[in-house]
Image (cartoon, helix red, strand yellow):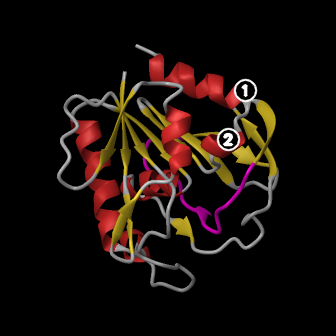
Amino acid sequence: MNIGIACRYDKGRYYLNDSYLSYFKKFSNTIEILNMKSKIDNIDVVIIPGGFDIDPKYYNQTNSTSFNINSYNDRLDFKLIALSIILNKKIIGICRGIQSLNVFFNGSLKQDIYFHNKNNHFVNFNNKYQLLNSFHHQSINNLGYNLKIIGLSVDGEIEAILYKKILGVQFHPELCHTPNIDKFLFDFINEA
């Protein structure tokens, strides 16, 4: 099983948080960091990680409270999502990644939900309540085409989506290490 994780670009440097690498090494010994030039032919699962906000122009809004917008990250996410769909690869979007998936499928975002940033809360994920972390100030507003909700916070924010080989979660599984979530991701990654 080969996993590719999109890098992030900010202030002249490319980077990827170590927490993603160490977490996904539990699922695969072969992890590749993906950028604009990467080919994903030999990648089985593409991870779209967290990061700063998506430019609201992609979901037909003007910017009111989106921060640190970076066109490289937007273009990289959308390119990897499109290539993954064309090549029939699995995709997991985490935090910003779920938002990128939703926008790619013509959904929209709430630009600021101040009550979720750094405020752990309960989420009904796949019909089980879990106390999960929260580092986001944005969330899904209108759900994208074909996406199905499989996780809602107790206050009604969309926390997880699924569509065929595409999974998105608003929380950070690489930081919470919840056995039920880990098993769900393991099963998703390894499912034929």
Mark 2 → mark 1, Cα distance in angstroms: 16 Å
Q: Do residues under tags 2 and 1 come within 8 Å of each other at their CB atoms?
A: no
Image point (33%, 75%), residue name: 12
From the viewer's perspective, is residue 1 above or below residue 76?
above
Residue 8 percent location from the top left of the image: 39, 60
Q: Which structural element holds mark 2?
A: strand
Image point (44%, 69%), residue name: 54
Span of residues in magenta = 133-148
Q: Is residue 103 left or right of residue 109?
A: left
Which residue is label 2 attached to?
151
From the viewer's perspective, is residue 60 above or below residue 92?
below
Image point (41%, 30%), residue name: 165
Q: State the quadrant of the N terminus.
A: top left
Q: Is residue 105 left or right of residue 112?
A: left
Q: Quadrant of residue 72?
A: bottom left
Tell me the crowding category of disc 2: few under 14, some 14 to 19, or many 20 or more residues within 10 angstroms, Cα based.
many
Q: Is residue 58 left or right of residue 110?
A: left
Residue 71 percent location from the top left of the image: 32, 72
What amino acid is labelled 2 in the image? Gly
Q: Which structural element holds mark 1?
A: helix
What amino acid is labelled 1 in the image? Pro
Q: Looking at the image, is mark 2 or mark 1 earlier in the sequence? A: 2
Residue 83 percent location from the top left of the image: 23, 43
Which residue is label 1 attached to?
179
Q: Is residue 122 magenta?
A: no
